[in-house]
Image (spheres, helix red, strand yellow):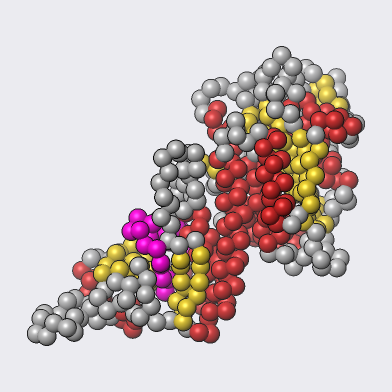
Amino acid sequence: MNFFTAKTATTKTSGDLLVFPIFQKKKKAVVAPLLDATDGGVRPSAPGSAKVPNLAQKIKKAGFAANAESFLQVYCSNTKSGWLLITGMGEVSEVGLDTIRKIAGQAAKKAREMKAKKVLVQVPEVGILGFDDATFARTWVEGAEMALSETGALKTKKKSPLLPAQWSFLASAKRLAALDNGIKQGTTFAAGCLFARRLVNAPPNYLTPSAMAAEARKLAKDEGLNCKILKVPQLKKMKMGGLLGVGQGSVNDPCLIVLEYRSKAPKAPKIALVGKGVTFDTGGISLKPGANMDHMKSDMGGAAAVMGALLIAARMKLPVNLTVIVPAAENMPDGNAVKPADVITMANGKTVEVLNTDAEGRLILADALWYAGKGKPDYIMDAATLTGACVVALGEHFAGVMSNSGELTDALRQAGGETFERVWPLPLIDEHKDAMKGTWSDLTNLGPREGGALTAAGFLSFFVDEKTEWAHIDIAGPSFKTSASATCPKGGTGFGARLLARAVQLLVS
Ligand code: BES
Ligand code: ZN
Ligand code: ZN
């Protein structure tokens, strides 16, 4: 889909559908702006004929109260586009950025249903909402793009996508520059999210560790990034016993993917993003139950998020030196698989007794975090579908953040509020680290059942320099959905790509 701006000529601009957002006041639709622009469904060519009701009357008759996310489809004879989609915005005081995304998403789906190729959007006066035109356009574009994200890539009978090819934001001339700027941002943020969703939704027989490496190479080529893939011999040289151990039960070898975006800005801060890339998690020898095991194709949601964030950062040319590190492996049961009571030695030299092969994420992340630290970054953030415990604690709408840095936690909370990829802080304390100390080895990979998300973070902390600002984000809850929402079909949500990109933007600006 392509987004443009045009000087307001609401009734005269041609298109297949005119989307007209209106507010609600005291439970009633505020029709005033409509009256200025599109009133007068009177047919002048039919002298003597009865007046057709005007829009305000039609809205009243339909009992349309402009509740947020409600719609009214009406025909208006004196607009060039004919069809109008009146979209309820709700009360001014209640409209948040995600209201805009949802409304845009619903409008996009309606437009697709109506087979509208060119959609016009009458930009409302957003000043009263406390945000600017650029923000409106950015979030609208995100919502529309995200709502129509691809789901049928592997169907043999291809439905032609029939997406609205062209969208035009209509506003007065002086507002167009800001709207254009917002369009650029929105397109970029949406692209990062859709990139992540595509990887999460890819079946695990397609997206093996080496296929993920190929995706990384392609991303690097498309976006002008450096890319390095470290394969088994190199992992052995670096003594990455965690990544090798998790991968050793699979015929698909593990690898470490390293992507770099280098800004031309002088003294740009160094940030490392690490993403869990388990392309399928069977649990290994500690095999998971069969029900819903297919969801474990999403166990590389962290990897998808950090790669999506990198795409955004590079396209936005953020003043940052960003390194993305993805440990990629498939966790399988096999004669050669790691088993409970095995002791493995990690890249930083620590020994770990594997008490449960299903707690594999922390093992591969440990080596990747150590690798990230070698680059002496100012900040490290990792994203991982790490624990069921985090899902139990926070549900599907929040990721958990465990961090040694107030600055990172604040940046993530703000970024989460804006992108609606929301995070909630959870404690990271010495007791949770101590719970991971071993009897036969330095550490074990299994803590007590209680506080499982917290002890998992405690385990990871042994692989991060104490002085480095670090945040661990457990995205097990929000990264995969079994039902669709206004802006996301069921499946991978792409959670984290926009969140991390926005957090990076906040940290470096
Ligand atoms: N990939 C899972 C965590 C997960 C659970 C992600 C639900 C998404 C949805 C992870 O590797 C895992 O299995 N963790 C175990 C750890 C336990 C054995 C300490 C868990 O959470 O049960
Ligand atoms: Zn697991
Ligand atoms: Zn896992």
Q: Measured along the vertical axis of the image, is residue 19 above or below residue 415? A: below
Provide residue 323's location: percent of width, then percent of height.
79, 51
Q: Measured along the vertical axis of the image, is residue 465 above or below residue 10? A: above
Q: Which residues are magenta?
A: 100-122
Magenta-colored segment: predominant secondary structure: helix
Queried whether the magenta region covers residue 114, the answer comes back as yes
The residue at the point 51 percent across, 54 percent down is 146
Count of numbered marks: 0
Which quadrant would residue 393 be assigned to in this image?
Answer: top right
Q: Is residue 197 left or right of residue 486?
A: right
The quadrant of the picture occupied by the C terminus is bottom right
Q: Nearer the viewer, residue 343 or 75?
A: 75
Provide residue 31's location: percent of width, then percent of height.
32, 76
Queried whether the magenta region covers residue 68, the answer comes back as no
The residue at the point 46 percent across, 53 percent down is 148
Which quadrant would residue 71 be assigned to in this image?
Answer: bottom left
Q: Nearer the viewer, residue 388 or 167?
A: 167
The residue at the point 73 percent across, 64 percent down is 318
Q: Is residue 82 left or right of residue 196?
A: left
The residue at the point 46 percent across, 43 percent down is 152
Provide residue 34's location: percent of width, then percent of height.
33, 78
Q: Nearer the viewer, residue 405 or 345?
A: 345
Q: In this rendering, does residue 373 appear at all?
A: yes
Provide residue 398's location: percent of width, then percent of height.
58, 47
Q: In this rendering, does residue 347 appear at all?
A: no
Q: Which residue ends up furthest to the top in the rendered image?
A: 335
